[in-house]
Image (spheres, helix red, strand yellow):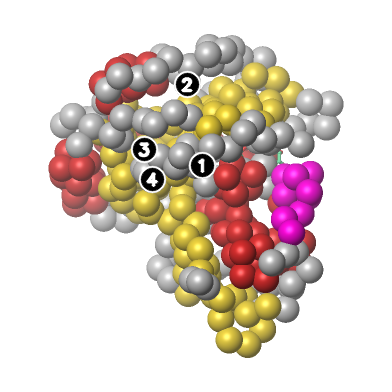
Amino acid sequence: MTTGEDAPAKVNLSLHVTGRRADGYHLLDSLVVFTSAGDRLDMAAGTGLRISGPEASGLSAGPDNLVTRAAALMGMQEIGLHLSKALPVASGIGGGSADAAAALRLLARTCGKPLPPMADILALGADVPVCLAGRHCRMQGIGEVLDPLPPLPPVWLVLVNPRVQISTPQVFRTLPCRDNAPMQATLPQWRDTPAFAAWLRDQRNDLESPARALAPVISQVLRVLAAQPECALARMSGSGATCFGFFATEMAASLAAQAVQASHPDWWVRATGILPHRSDQLTRATT
Ligand SMILES: C[C@](O)(CO)[C@H](O)COP(=O)(O)OP(=O)(O)OC[C@H]1O[C@@H](n2ccc(N)nc2=O)[C@H](O)[C@@H]1O
Ligand SMILES: Nc1ncnc2c1ncn2[C@@H]1O[C@H](COP(=O)(O)OP(=O)(O)OP(=O)(O)O)[C@@H](O)[C@H]1O
């Protein structure tokens, strides 16, 4: 039995904000995919959380860390854990949620503990349920209604973060319209990558425009990505500031990542595939 779990980054290929609940949380309709790029959580000797890795600096290992909070929810706050942090913090690719989900999976698997109720999981973060599912999903509600996607055509992404941290609540607060159209009720079957990209181009990330107003560098990132050869789509993920370029081949994505990194050495740039399809179907999950 392995004593670790990957914590893959999530990317919102689309993110439609379709309403707002009385408690202020927003209703979403989003295509969420998971990438090979991510953090890693392992069991460790001793007690408590230790963090290392290229993105560890400035991230507290105290009780507010989402890994510690997830462990506490499992009744195991004292257990020894090591987080290898590779994803930039507060960047729209759900690193904290992925880490929390990895902690829940790891402790459930290795210690035989039951998972907490969905409401408690959702309270850790709206992205934690989809990260716990760990498969490409259509995500609705505030993040708790999950429908697994059918196998997707090959997709390669170039993730670019301009090293600006964005506050998710602030982006939602400055959203000009909260009642936007959802995606179509029944998603099409995408026959190949160009068809998938063409369909995605008609979808939106409704948080992109408020995030660009808060951090104008996002517009520059999108322009740079869109200018790369064979980039079929450039869009922001989540509440930003990370944006993705969408490519049909690993080679095109890899060359684009090299070019973006060379022209912008201070930006965080990764070429990554999406995780393979999992056939152990999640039946519709909700609270
Ligand atoms: C924007 C997304 O990244 C899309 O996947 C997620 O919905 C955000 O997920 P998250 O970072 O796990 O969000 P949380 O930590 O639960 O919420 C942070 C804040 O974002 C706002 N929030 C979040 C999710 C949601 N459906 N509606 C909201 O209005 C709320 O102000 C909330 O206080
Ligand atoms: N293990 C963790 N990794 C990253 N951030 C964490 C962690 N634990 C707590 N946090 C806090 O959670 C907040 C959100 O971080 P995260 O990296 O998940 O943001 P994000 O990528 O924008 O998420 P999302 O896309 O779900 O909105 C940050 O303010 C950070 O300080």
Residue sitting nearer the eye, 92 or 113:
113
Image marks 3 and 2: residues in contact by CB distance under 8 Å:
no
User: In the rendering, which numbered label is found on residue 280?
Assistant: 1
Amino acid type for the residue under numbered disc 2: Arg
Residue sitting nearer the eye, 173 or 69:
69
Cα–Cα gap, marks 1 and 2: 29 Å
Q: Disc 4 or 2, which lies upstream in sequence?
A: 2
Image marks 4 and 1: residues in contact by CB distance under 8 Å:
no
**Foreground: disc 3 or disc 1:** 1
Q: Which residue is mark 4?
A: 275
> Viewed as shown, does residue 96 lie left or right of 85?
right
Q: Disc 3 or 1, which lies upstream in sequence?
A: 3
Residue 105 in sight in this render = yes
Cα–Cα gap, marks 3 and 4: 16 Å
Q: Which span is picked out in magenta?
A: 114-123
> Viewed as shown, does residue 96 lie left or right of 217?
right
Q: Which residue is mark 3?
A: 244
State yes or no: residue 116 in magenta: yes
